[in-house]
Amino acid sequence: MVSTDLISTLRSLSRSDKFYIMQLLISELAQQETDLIKPEQAYPIWSPYGADEAADTMLKVLEAAKAQDHA
C-alpha cells in the first residue's frame, strides 16, 4: 500500500520531476516484463491451423444463434 506521505511528496514535485519519476517507474516495469521471457527457452504458441474440432464447434454455436434469431 502506498503511504499518504509518499503521495503527498509526489504531488508536491515539479512537473519535470513527476515526468522523471514516471519514466523511472515505467522503465522498471518494462524491465520486469522482459525478465519473464528467458532466452534459449521454447514457449508453446497456439495456432488456429489444424484446429478443425474448434472450428466445427464454433460453426455449431453460430448456427444455433442464427436459428434463435429467426425463431
Image: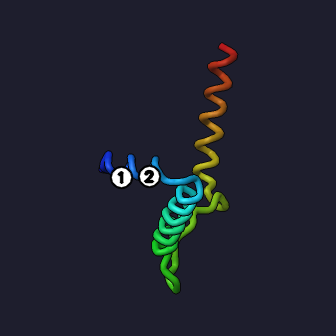
Q: Residue at x 66, y 18 (%)?
A: 69
Residue 3 place in picture, x, y as percent: 30, 49
Q: Residue at x 66, y 22 (%)?
A: 67
The local secondary structure at tag 2 comes to helix
Please tell me the numbered disc located at residue 52.
none
Spatial CA distance of label 2 from label 1 is 6 Å
Q: Residue at x 61, y 57 (%)?
A: 51
Residue 21 left/right relative to 1:
right
Q: Nearer the viewer, residue 64 or 14?
A: 14
The image shows residue 66, relative to residue 53, as above or below, that is above
Quadrant of residue 62 in the image?
Answer: top right
- Which corner quadrant holds the C terminus? top right
Residue 38 place in picture, x, y as percent: 48, 79
Residue 67 left/right relative to 10:
right
The image shows residue 35, relative to residue 53, as above or below, that is below
* Kind of residue at disc 1: Leu
Residue 3 left/right relative to 26:
left
For the residues bearing labels 2 and 1, Cβ distance under 8 angstroms: yes
Please tell me the numbered disc located at residue 6.
1
> For mark 2, what is the residue?
10
Residue 4 left/right relative to 65:
left
